[in-house]
Amino acid sequence: MINYENFFTYAYWEYEVIRHMFSFTAAVFAASLFYFAMTVGQAAAKYRTTFVISGVVMVSATLELFLLWLMWNRAFTFDAATMTFSIAEGQVFSNGYRYANWLIDVPMLLTQFLIVLQFAGAELRSRWVKLAGAGALMIVLGYVGQYYEPQVAGFAEGSGAPFWIWGGLSWLVFFYLLYAANEAVGTGKARLEPRAAGLMQNAWILLIVTWFIYGFAYMIPGIPGINDSSTWVVFRQGIFTFADVCSKAVFGILLSQVALEQSRTEEGGSGQRRAA
Ligand code: RET
């Protein structure tokens, strides 16, 4: 089965906006990679891993978005008479790369989250198993569910129930993940100096908001009244774009600032910002 994006005819602008969102996101991640590479040297040794993890997230996400861009270009053909794009013979577009990328990035983002929250050794390992395990399971469940998009949107014969069942299970795991992460934030934040703790709180709120958005984007093909609209495909890809930029790049930058803030304090408070 293929994603519901394949069943639409797109107005010229709709197709182009989606194409440009893919290239924009790939460029943001490539640029962010440069930022992390340039700032890692300013952090204390124990925080450098978080910059390296951000680098891993940026490389995998740049590749993923580039592949989506390539696939989007190849999968549709332009009709000059109607100024529209529709699916090309024998081609498909798939959001599967997104899920494959999340499977790498979600455990990575949760790892850096725990490191910046000052967990180490056995405490880090036990929390990591719970959080990264839940993150990976959440993505795999959603990955299976999205194969039923054509049925739930009414483009193909068959029941849409599996879309809701797999998606519903993924939501349950997501709520467990939020519960476990909230507990980790509560414990870890108390060890940070006040400025870093404030930044950490912002990162946590950003995580909650943007991760919820992914779940909403998943459900769009199952919502009557909007699941038959090509403009909503643009919105859905726009939601993924916004959530991707915020949850990978902005989140990584916030955590890097927590790490830099902590590094300054732990290295004797000699930083200029402290003196000011
Ligand atoms: C799915 C399926 C439907 C229910 C929920 C989902 C959540 C997805 C999330 C993805 C996060 C991705 C990130 C990527 C960063 O690189 C799987 C769409 C809740 C939270 C943070």
Image (spheres, helix red, strand yellow):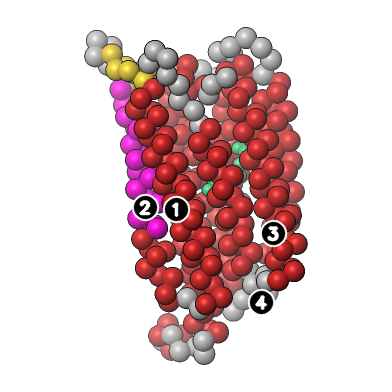
Q: Is residue 168 above or below residue 160?
A: below
**Label 1 – label 4 distance at C-alpha:** 28 Å
The tag earlier along the polypeptide, 3 or 2, is: 2
Residue 191: which disc? 4
Q: Secondary structure at mark 3?
A: helix
Comparing labels 4 and 3, the label whose residue is closer to the camera:
3
Magenta stretch holds residue 226: no
* Left or right of residue 141, residue 217 in this image: left
Q: Secondary structure at mark 1?
A: helix
Q: Which residue is mark 2?
A: 30
Residue 124: which disc? none
Q: Which residues are magenta?
A: 12-33
**Mark 4: few, some, or many residues within 10 Å (few <14, many ≥20)?**
few
Q: Is residue 182 above or below residue 191?
A: above
The tag earlier along the polypeptide, 3 or 1, is: 1
Work out whether residue 140 or residue 250 is closer to the camera in this orientation and state it. Answer: 140
Magenta stretch holds residue 31: yes
The tag earlier along the polypeptide, 4 or 3, is: 3
The tag earlier along the polypeptide, 1 or 4, is: 1
* Quadrant housing residue 138: top right
* Left or right of residue 83, residue 72 in this image: right
Q: Which residue is mark 1?
A: 58
Quadrant in which the C terminus appears: bottom left
Is residue 182 visible from the viewing direction of this image? no
Circles 1 and 2: CB distance less than 8 Å?
A: yes
Q: Which residue is mark 3?
A: 128
**Label 1 – label 2 distance at C-alpha:** 7 Å
